[in-house]
Structures are given as C-alpha cells and as structure tokens.
Amino acid sequence: MTETTHIQTTPQGDGAKQHSPEYRVAVDSLRGLRQDLIHDAFAYRPLPGRRTDGRFARRLPGRLREYTAWTPHALIVAAALISLALATVDTGGPAVLTGLFCAVPVLLTMVRPVGAFWASMVSTPIVAVLGSRWGEWPWAPGGFACHLTVLTVVAMRTRPRAAGWMWVLTGVYALLADAGIGPTNTYGTNSGAMLVISAMILLCVTVWHTRRHAEQEVTAQQTVTAHERSRRTLLEERTTIARELHDVVAHHMSVVAIQAEAAPYRVENPPPELEKAFATIRENAVAALTELRRVLGVVRAEDYEVPDAPQPTLADLDGLLANVREAGLIVEKTVTGAVRELPQGVELSAYRIVQEALSNTLRHAPGATARVEIGYVLGGLGLRVVNDAPPNPSLIKPSPGAGHGITGMRERVTMLTGEMTAGGTEDGGYEVTVFLPVALPGEDDA
C-alpha cells in the first residue's frame, strides 16, 4: 500500500499577515509624524515677507509701505524679546543663559520652523531646571511664552496635521513631567494651562488655514471658470461665423454649379471643348461644395436650422436702426463714399458688428445717443459706431452684460484680416472703429 503525501503550497503574498485597521491607523499616524516633524526637521525655510498690496498697506506712504513687508519678522523678534525678559527677570539661575534658551527657539522659527519646535522642547526642561523664582513646573514663565510663541508660528507656517502632532508631543511631555520627573520645590503644575491655551491657539490657526485654503480654491476656480467662459464664448462665436460662412459660400458654389451646368445650353452648337470645360467647372464646384459642407457642417448643432431668409447685409441696416429706435436709442446713420455691392461675407460681418455695437450701447449706456458712420473707401469698408455718455448714469442702472461682445467683433474682423479699435471717448462714451479690406476687381483677376 502506497502512502500519498499532499503538500499544500501557499502562493507568495497570500500568507502575509493581515493587519487590523487599528494597526494601519497607528502606522499611518507614525508615518505622518515622521513626515511632518522628523524628516528634514532643520531644513532652511526662510519666512516670507508680508504682501505690500494689502487692504491696510495700500493706505500707507510709499516708503512706509515697503517696511510693512517685514512685519512678521518684527513681531517674532518682539516675542523673542518678551520671552527673554520673562526668563531673565524670573530666573534663579544664570540669567543670560536662561534668556538665550528662551529667545533662540523663537528666533529660529524665521528660518527653520520645525527645528524651532524641537529646540523649544529641549530648552523647556533646561529652563525649568535652571530654576524659576516661583517654582513653576514644567514651564517657567520664559519657557511658557517661548513654547506658546513657537507653537503658534510653526503652526501658521506648516499644515494643520503638524500642529496636531506638536500639541500631542507637548501633552506627552507634560504628562511625563507631572508624573514626577522634575524638581520637588514646585508649587503646582501649569501643564493644564499650557495645553488649554495652546489648544485654543492651534484651533484658531487651523481655522485660519482652512479658510485660507478655501479662499485659494475659490479664487482658482473663479479664474478657471472665467477662462473657460471666455474660451466657450470664443468658440461659440467662431461656430456662428462658420455657420454663416457655410451659408454664404455654399450659396455661391451652388450658383456656380448651376450656371456651369446650364451654360452649354445657352450657346448654339457649342464646341466639345467648351462643354468639357463647363462640365469640369461643375464637377469641381460640386466637389468643393460637398467638401465644404463636410468640413463646416460639423459645427452646426443638431437643432440648428438653415434660415429661410437670406443673411442680412448693409442694405438691411435701416431695419436694424428702426428696431433699436423703438427700443429707445436715438441713433443716426451717415454714409460716405460711393455705395457699392461688397462680398457677402463682408456685408454680413459689417451688419453684425453694427448690431453688436448698438446692442452694447443699449445695454451699457441707456439713454445715450449713438452715431453709425459707414465709409465706402478705396480698398475696403470703414465702420464707426460711437455713443456719448448716458445723460443720467446715477438714475439709470446699466445692464451688466456678459462682456463678450467685443470678442465677437474682433473674431469677425480677424477672419477678414481687418483692423479694429474699441475704447472709451473723452466725453465718457464709447467708440468702435473697424476697417474691413475688400480687394479691387483688378486684384482678384491678378
């Protein structure tokens, strides 16, 4: 009879001991302690200066405003002097040495904040052992002021978790000191006062950290939101321009294709070469129209419908002016130069620019008067829309608006390689000036 032995092999890693949640919390806590208060504890971290563009600093004279940048350093030096004075007056041992043990940790917070905490923990029992005239334990008056100042400054310069660890270590030292480690000629312990006062101070600092972090997040989110809003408005305007461009170019390409198809029938006995040329023109026009619809058609929204009426031109400007007059805007139109038909893209963009400029006048300067000047010049079209200041700005509140009308105008002008300026006038009004270049017929042939 053969005896068979079964050997069970445990895969590598499966036999590892599963630790309890409490163990993992303890390990994570010790890892946090090492990261916050032990790793690079004496790293050089100079205290930054205070901002000179704050609410109160802006009200100070120029020279004095520059000195406000050193306000945090001056406060720390003052706290160090207070700790030095308390240690010197109250000590029963060498006054200079005791004062240095109290002042140095406070000054160290300006360059090595975490190291200043450990220096304060080391100096605290030394100052207490050197002797206090009133027998305070475990914090002499100078050490008490020193340790509170160090806790406050280091908590402000680090994160809330580090402040919590500093308070815990302070409590551990207090428990050990109150357990009998220390001199016997004391009149009581001040550990409770230290722990309560430091807890209140660190709680206030933690709230300040939380609020500051929240304000920074809100500011960053507002910046991103404003950037995204501007970018979305720009894309929407480009989409609108692409739609209108599609309608304009598609119309002309369709006309070219139809005329090329009908042209051979208007000539009696056309030569084969002419028929072939017109057929090639029609095929190219249809191919270009198909490609144009494929490329530009993707910008249309699913619910976008091609307008039944043709796109507006400068010939429809009188109707636009009549509408804004009904809305309460007094507007005048002046046309100079020889009126001529311009490319449909130029006509449409000029109409939209005048429309947006008058809309901005209604929105931002209610009650003001406006002038629309159109100049047909050699090589292009000039536009000028200007309004004066509202008559009673204190009685009529302007509409805030989105502030993206000028962006849309610039997009249209840029698309046509034109020039545009927009800004306030000396009398408190606003002026928009645009030049849209138009090639001469001879230049097109060339």
Image: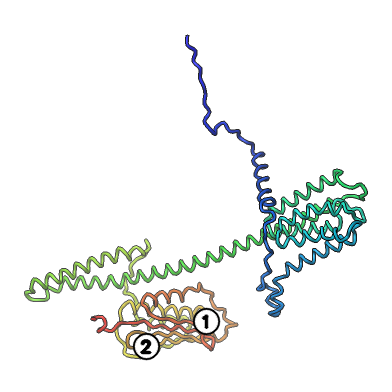
State whether residue 186 is above or below residue 94: above
Q: Which residue is mark 2?
A: 375
Camera-side residue: 279 or 7? 7
Camera-side residue: 265 or 444? 444
Answer left or right for 156 relative to 422: right
| Crowding near the residue tagged with mark 1, few <14, some 14–19, many ≥20 C-alpha atoms within 10 Å | many
State whether residue 55 is above or below residue 154: below
Q: Position of residue 8 (x, y in %)?
A: 52, 24
Tell me which residue sits at (67%, 66%) in the image.
48
Residue 338 numbered tag: none
Q: Which residue is mark 1?
A: 366
The chosen color scheme is rainbow
Give the position of the C terminus as an image quadrant: bottom left
* Residue 47 figure quarter: bottom right
User: Are the residues at dot 1 and dot 2 in contact (C-beta closer than 8 Å)?
Assistant: no
| Mark positioned earlier in the residue sequence (1 or 2) | 1
Q: Position of residue 113 (x, y in %)?
A: 71, 58
Tell me which residue sits at (65%, 62%) in the image.
212
SS at circle 2:
strand
